[in-house]
Image (tube, rainbow, N blue to C red):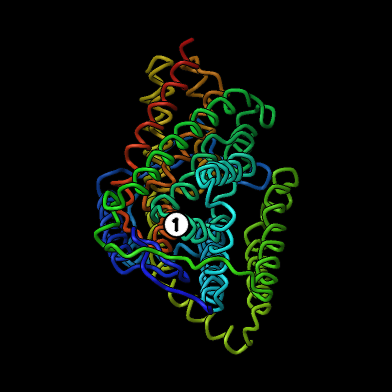
Amino acid sequence: MEEKRESGRTGGRVKGVSISIKSFATALAMLFLLMVVTYAATFLIPGGEYERAVVDGQQQVLPGTYTPVQGGIAFWKWLLSPVLMLGAEGGGTVIAILVFLLVVGGIFHCMDKSGLMYYMLQAIRHRYETKKYRMLLAITLFFMCMGSFVGSFEECVPLVPIAVALAVSMGWDALTGLGMSVLAIGCGFSTGICNPFTVGVAQQLAGLPMFSGAPLRILSFLAIYAVLAFFLVGYAKKIEAHPEKSLLYAKAGKESLVLDDFVPQPDKGRGLKRFIGILGAGILLIFASGFLPFLQGVLMPMIAVLFLAAGLAAVRACRMEWGQIGRYFKDGAVSLLPAVLLILMAGSVRYTLTQAHILDTVLYAVSAFIEKMPAGAAVLLLYAFVMVMDFFISSGSAKAFLMMPLICPVADFCGISRQLGVLAFAFGDGFSNVFFFTNPVILISLGLAGVGYVTWIRWSFKIQLVILAVTGAILYAAACF
């Protein structure tokens, strides 16, 4: 059988990746509204700036140097901000994400057309059909470890469509697949046992030994994994027994993704081995980056190249001609162009705030307010403050250089250990990454799964509230006892 494309009973299907029109329109409207609100704020919030110094090649805020300056941004700059932000600080990272996204789209479309995606699902289902929940827990733990130990986030986007298709083939839905992949990696990234991009950078800026204070982060990791596992297994069992309870059921109808009995095919088996082998090397490279800092700056381009090589080797093993590969790759990449616009619009918000000189004003006002609070309230306010900033600045390392020089003196003044300040920063930077529509990864992942943003919020807000309560309790207890 070459391939099969039937609607999943709860919203998934075997296919290449593409952005659904509904999820694109929803995200586009929300981002445009945010751009308008941000522009309006430039007229209401006075301008101000902190002095900055270059430390270890990175710009760092100098506490106590805030001074008022002329604010505002020209209308034409705001209008063109989605393009102008590419030339601003952090623009190189955005360009790398966009190229990475187009490579993912092109390769998955080629794999779909070759029938390799369908064959892979047949093979996985054949092996784990009688122990599917053990598989769900193992995949969830794998993604959490990827985020917590090596700070992987954007790099795992290529695995999201596989997790979604796998979840649907097991009788669950696309939301289950998103939960055990992108939600899990966001949770792992947040607990950050040795996440070099949040905990590593933040501790360096706080003058703490690298990755010290790990026991509390390990406790947080285990607590969040238990919460997430309970939620996902319970939801998967509910959907398996009552598919009509899925938020995606009305869209998908009652059709189900029926996989034929697995029959080994030498060409596709060889292609699958090549894909897993090369992609496995990429995963090992991600883990190695936690111990080899020089890899961190070039990790995303290297993963993109390895993923491209894995996909090409796999489809060539399935006897796909180079002309077909080029045509299908182009079609897959073009199908993800709407996501490019969304990512540029999300990045334009930070550009507007910095060009109008109001971002430092907000930092100054909030830090001055938190300094007046007792330790327990102060650490929770720091958590909330970082989470709000995550709405506008998705990069964890960029936020660390911006906020940690301000968080440290606030923590000292309120009697909070700097170690706890780092944990509040990691929590605030991470969990909201899979909730805020200004983060490119959640926009891409939802688009690839064909799930609308509103649907995602309706499905995930309960687990997000539980996680917020658990992490808030951990911070409060650590500050007060």
Where 54 sits versus 248, above or below?
A: above
Residue 8 position within the rendered picture, expressed as x and y whole percent measured from the top left: 37, 63
Residue 167, how many percent across, how many down?
46, 54
Q: Which of 182 and 116 is in front in this view?
A: 116
The structure residue drawn at horizontal position 67% and vertical position 72%, both measured from the top left corner, is: 271
Q: Is residue 164 above or below residue 473?
A: below
Q: In this view, does 476 lie to the left or right of 276?
A: left
Q: Which residue is drawn at 25% across and 57% down?
A: 33
Determine whether, in the image, residue 146 is placed left or right of residue 369: right
| Front in this rendered view, residue 392 or 11 | 11
Can see residue 349?
yes
Q: Residue at x 42, y 56 (%)?
A: 351
Q: Is residue 34 above or below residue 359?
A: below
Describe residue 238's horizontal placement relative to residue 123 as left or right.
left
Looking at the rendered structure, the secondary structure element under dot 1 is helix
Locate residue 201, reporting x and y percent.
62, 38
In front here: 452 or 289? 452
Task: Say whether residue 425 is visible.
Answer: no
Question: Is 275 positioned to the left or the right of 60 in the image?
Answer: right
Q: How crowded is mark 1: few (under 14 residues within 10 Å), some or many (20 or more)?
A: many
The amino acid marked with disc number 1 is Pro
* Tag 1 residue: 440
Give the mark count. 1
Residue 98, percent across and down?
51, 66
